[in-house]
Image (spheres, rainbow, N blue to C red):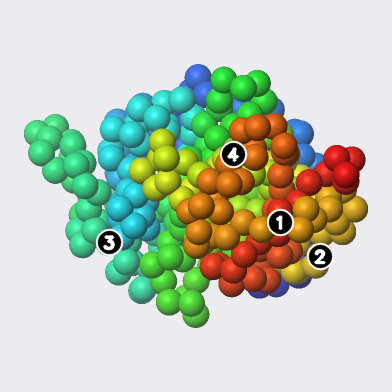
């Protein structure tokens, strides 16, 4: 962690803190008590999505998500953010004091230039629209939406993005996206996390570092993007630092062996072939985090199984 902090100097700032956007009934009873980790010593900012006084903060979260996923036609409708995200689950991330905003951050987060679509503030006769970031106590820089599922102990990672996607590389906050999801998983004591991303997406390189990645769905025609991988990890904090130091995950190589078969992120038939094997009970199947990190996004990936199955 010390090496990480040298690169992620923003984590030492008193003007940047983790936040949790959660309604009172969904608060975690003993946050951060399951995973033994000292990465997040600061008490988070707690905000309630059912409190109308927090609408400006919510709009900044929503605007960030909209700009990150709008180009891929996957931005959330506003009602989905409320009905399917903050009411059943919560949003976590990092936020900054307005006084600490750099010039470029002010420009790309300006609420007058980038209002949140469909905000009731814009048409309300009783709510005042925020015109400057200085009117906020905290400005969100990232968001990670996580929702509990009916499967006991399992949470669904619904969405993750950060302001880094809008910044030139030299202005980015090192590791902000990864640390936002890490904080949410740690804070909520998540033991099993299921998520979705598209084959060939750079997001797979990030999501594969939170635990050994099991493919529970290789093809998803129910989704608006059928070429979607549905993955599951048993959250393992020992894997997290490897995202930054690039060390091989020897524990994975000890537990899993290659099947000598591949998944091709450019081939729909390859996805469907693996999906049929999953459905017929031939799995569970896993992907190697180290291989995902090293390979081009469109290269074939080896499929692994537990060595106990060989």
Nearer to us: label 2 or label 1: 1
First in sequence: mark 4 vs mark 2 = 2
Residue that numbered label 4 is attached to: 276
Residue 267 seen from this side? yes
Nearer to us: label 3 or label 1: 1
- Residue 48 placement (x, y as % from top left): 42, 31
Residue in the foreground of this view, choosing between 250 and 240: 250
Nearer to us: label 4 or label 3: 4
- The residue under the point 80% across, 55% down is 258
First in sequence: mark 4 vs mark 3 = 3
First in sequence: mark 4 vs mark 1 = 1
Element type at mark 3 = loop
Q: Are marks 2 and 1 in contact (CB under 8 Å)?
A: no
Q: Is residue 178 above or below residue 125?
A: below
Distance between the Cα atoms at labels 4 and 2? 30 Å
Residue in the foreground of this view, choosing between 86 and 239: 239
Residue that numbered label 1 is attached to: 261
Residue that numbered label 3 is attached to: 110
Q: Quadrant of residue 72?
A: bottom left
Residue that numbered label 2 is attached to: 248
First in sequence: mark 2 vs mark 3 = 3
């Amino acid at each position: 962690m010390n090496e990480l902090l040298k690169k992620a100097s923003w984590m030492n700032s008193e003007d940047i803190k983790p936040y949790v956007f959660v309604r009172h009934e969904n608060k975690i009873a003993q946050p951060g008590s399951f995973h033994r980790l000292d990465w997040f010593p600061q008490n988070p900012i707690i905000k309630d999505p059912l409190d109308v006084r927090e609408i400006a903060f919510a709009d900044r979260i929503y605007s960030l998500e909209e700009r990150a996923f709008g180009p891929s036609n996957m931005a959330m409708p506003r009602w989905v953010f409320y009905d399917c995200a903050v009411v059943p689950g919560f949003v976590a991330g990092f936020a900054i004091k307005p006084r600490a905003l750099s010039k470029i951050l002010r420009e790309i987060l300006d609420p007058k230039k980038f209002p949140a679509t469909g905000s009731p503030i814009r048409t309300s006769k009783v709510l005042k629209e925020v015109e400057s970031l200085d009117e906020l106590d905290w400005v969100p820089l990232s968001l990670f939406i996580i929702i509990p599922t009916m499967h006991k102990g399992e949470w669904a990672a619904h969405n993750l993005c950060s302001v880094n996607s809008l910044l030139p590389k030299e202005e980015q906050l090192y590791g902000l996206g990864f640390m936002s999801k890490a904080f949410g998983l740690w804070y909520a004591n998540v033991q099993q996390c299921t998520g979705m991303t598209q084959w060939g997406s750079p997001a797979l390189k990030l999501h594969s570092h939170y635990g050994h990645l099991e493919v529970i769905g290789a093809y998803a025609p129910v989704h608006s993007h059928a070429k979607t991988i549905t993955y599951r990890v048993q959250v393992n904090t020992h894997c997290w630092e490897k995202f930054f130091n690039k060390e091989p995950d020897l524990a994975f190589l000890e537990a899993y062996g290659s099947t000598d078969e591949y998944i091709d992120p450019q081939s729909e038939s390859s996805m469907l072939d693996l999906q049929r094997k999953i459905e017929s009970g031939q799995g569970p199947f896993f992907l190697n985090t180290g291989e995902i990190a090293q390979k081009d996004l469109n290269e074939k990936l080896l499929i692994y199984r537990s060595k106990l199955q060989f």
